[in-house]
């Protein structure tokens, strides 16, 4: 799908500026977990495989503010994940997953890329039955490989959340999470201004609810506030002051005179999804996200994403 | 018998044998239900579509006419992370086994007043059977697989059945008499008592009974995947 919009786009290979301690620790932790679990009853594990395909429209892929930099794109995502699910003891469940994901766009195909992720989720139920509240701790470590090397790197997430059913139809959940990613280091465009635009971290808080409309239809509404680093694109020149930016790099994925800037933001995401259970293992999901982002200078960035997702679970 | 025969005069002994010769075949015939009635029950929805898994019970109105035979064991299996069968009918006092044919763990539980229990099931290890000793409806779930739901209907009468895919069930060997006949289905929207009717069954009679009930769209726990994020 699509083509390189800049045929002469040079591929760049620079040293990653990842945090080796955090990365190494996470990987070691996941490895140890796999080892422990494999000795605690692998025969009783349940294997879960998910296949997902999504088509989405992003109204502002670069999260830009100025009209000429606002680019709407259509994208496709295909993902497959698989892993064992263990009941460690009554009420305590552990899910391990490996996930491969590929995303491609109809324009700005330098953003096409894939990711390989290891995910772990530990869940504790407080009581017996569907209505019992539960808490979970989830972590992931993924390798992002984007055609535009600037965006390639590692991404880690950590989330602590809880979920409970209220009656037969409604479930509420809350989650707080941390995320960080690393990009590829590139030369500074201006002395003294860092270029590690995609070395980002943030914290987020989510509340949401599910409401079962019918046996097959589920409505999900979710609100997330995120505080931390974000990036946006701007067509400008080096003479620009890059006000509010904590890092700047050239971004040939969008054009020769486009810069991508790292900023400190507060963002609000509102997600609405309608999930239709087509069968016992299949669902088709319609999602809409509206996102508002405000940086430290008070500039507002908005975008919306509309998606249709097909999911198949083999369990 | 030999001792008895030796104490009886010869004529009394002959009379005794003659009575036995009449009574024994009669008992045999009765025990095979040749003189008993048959109830053909059909359960449909309002549009005439057959309803599977509807429980049909026939309770003798004369309290002392309830039979004593008890099916001593029932089985509720776990297959492909579902309870099989979805609805099981047993008589009070029945032991039910949960064999777990899946090669993974299940954790079966029930909060129902008729039977509260919790039963961790491991693949390849037989769990102790559960005694269903009170009449009522027992709703079961699995603490690991939230979508799993199954029902055990525990009844005092020995005359019960469950409709097949064609919506029909036949109750055999019903002694003649008056019966309260009623149906129950997990998804029906009226109380079981509202379906009750009284029927008089004669010996060797075959009686048909038909019910039309509403089954609102079931709100069974969902098994299909739910999006964890927006996927983009």
Image (cartoon, coloured by chain):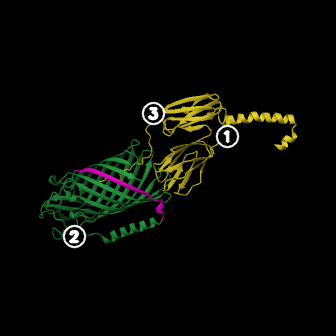
> Left or right: where does residue A82 sit relative to residue B57?
left
Q: Chain of mark 3?
A: B
Circle 2 sits in a helix, a strand or a loop, which is it?
loop
At x 22%, y 64%, the residue is A149
| Residue A170 placement (x, y as % from top left) | 41, 46
At x 45%, y 33%, the residue is B49
How many neighbours does mark 1 have within 10 angstroms: few (below 14), some (14-19), or many (20 or more)? Answer: few
| Residue B106 placement (x, y as % from top left) | 50, 54
Which of B149/A151 is in front?
B149
Rendered image quadrant of residue B14: top right
Compute the Cα span from label 1 to label 2: 84 Å
Q: Which chain is yellow?
A: B
Q: Which chain is green?
A: A
- Report the predominant secondary structure element of the magenta stretch: strand
Q: Chain of mark 1?
A: B
| Residue B43 placement (x, y as % from top left) | 51, 33
Q: Is residue A55 magenta?
A: yes
Circle 3 sits in a helix, a strand or a loop, which is it?
loop
Tell me the residue that label 1 is attached to: B68
Establish if A222 lies above or below B59: below
Q: Is residue A128 visible?
A: yes
In this rendering, which labeled residue sits more in front, label 1 or label 2? 1
> Left or right: where does residue B149 sit relative to residue B181?
left
Q: Chain of mark 2?
A: A
Q: Is residue A273 visible?
A: no
Q: Is residue B50 magenta?
A: no
Circle 1 sits in a helix, a strand or a loop, which is it?
loop
Q: Which range is magenta? A: A40-58
Tell me the residue that label 2 is attached to: A14
Tell me the residue that label 3 is attached to: B49
């Amino acid at each position: 799908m699509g083509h390189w919009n800049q045929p002469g786009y040079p591929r760049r290979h620079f040293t990653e500026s990842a945090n080796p301690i955090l990365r190494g620790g996470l990987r070691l932790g996941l490895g140890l977990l796999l080892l422990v679990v494999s000795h605690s009853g692998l025969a009783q594990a349940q294997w879960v495989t998910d296949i997902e395909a999504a088509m989405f429209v992003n109204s502002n892929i670069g999260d830009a503010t100025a009209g000429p930099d606002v680019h709407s794109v259509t994208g496709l995502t295909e993902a497959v994940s698989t892993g064992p699910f263990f009941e460690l003891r009554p009420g305590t469940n552990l899910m391990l997953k490996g996930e491969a994901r590929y995303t491609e766009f109809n324009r700005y195909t330098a953003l096409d890329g894939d990711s390989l992720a290891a995910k772990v989720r530990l869940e504790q139920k407080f009581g017996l039955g569907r209505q019992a509240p539960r808490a979970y701790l989830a972590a992931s470590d993924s390798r992002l490989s984007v055609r535009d090397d600037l965006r390639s790197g590692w991404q880690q997430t950590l989330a602590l959340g809880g979920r409970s059913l209220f009656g037969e139809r409604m479930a509420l959940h809350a989650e707080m999470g941390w995320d960080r990613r690393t990009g590829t280091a590139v030369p500074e465009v201006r002395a003294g201004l860092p270029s590690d635009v995609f070395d980002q971290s943030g914290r987020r808080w989510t509340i949401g609810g599910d409401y079962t409309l019918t046996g097959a239809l589920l409505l999900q509404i979710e609100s997330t506030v995120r505080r931390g680093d974000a990036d946006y694109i701007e067509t400008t020149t080096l003479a620009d002051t890059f006000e509010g930016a904590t890092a700047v790099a050239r971004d040939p994925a969008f054009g020769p005179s486009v810069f991508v800037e790292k900023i400190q933001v507060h963002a609000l995401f509102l997600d609405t999804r309608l999930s239709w259970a087509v069968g016992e293992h299949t669902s088709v999901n319609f999602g809409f996200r509206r996102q508002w982002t405000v940086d430290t200078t008070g500039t507002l960035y908005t975008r919306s994403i509309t998606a249709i997702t097909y999911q198949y679970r083999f369990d | 018998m030999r001792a008895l025969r030796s104490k009886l005069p010869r004529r009394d002994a002959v009379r005794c044998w003659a009575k036995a010769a009449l009574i024994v075949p009669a008992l045999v015939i009765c025990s095979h239900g040749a003189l008993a009635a048959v109830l053909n029950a059909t359960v449909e929805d309002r549009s005439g579509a057959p309803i599977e898994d509807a429980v049909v019970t026939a309770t003798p109105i004369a309290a002392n006419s309830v039979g004593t035979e008890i099916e001593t064991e029932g089985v509720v299996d776990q297959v492909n992370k579902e309870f099989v069968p979805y609805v099981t009918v047993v008589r009070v006092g029945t032991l039910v086994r949960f064999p777990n044919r899946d090669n993974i763990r299940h954790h079966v539980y029930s909060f129902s007043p008729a039977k509260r229990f919790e039963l961790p099931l491991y693949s390849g290890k037989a769990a102790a059977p559960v005694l269903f000793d009170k009449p009522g409806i027992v709703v079961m779930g699995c603490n690991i697989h939230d979508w799993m739901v199954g029902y055990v209907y525990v009844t005092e009468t020995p005359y019960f059945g469950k409709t097949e895919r064609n919506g029909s069930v036949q109750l055999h060997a019903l002694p003649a008499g008056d019966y309260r006949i009623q149906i129950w289905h997990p998804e029906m929207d009226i109380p079981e008592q509202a379906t009750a009717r009284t029927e008089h069954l004669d010996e060797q009679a075959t009686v048909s009974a038909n019910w039309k009930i509403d089954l609102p769209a079931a709100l069974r726990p969902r098994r299909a995947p739910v999006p964890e994020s927006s996927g983009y």
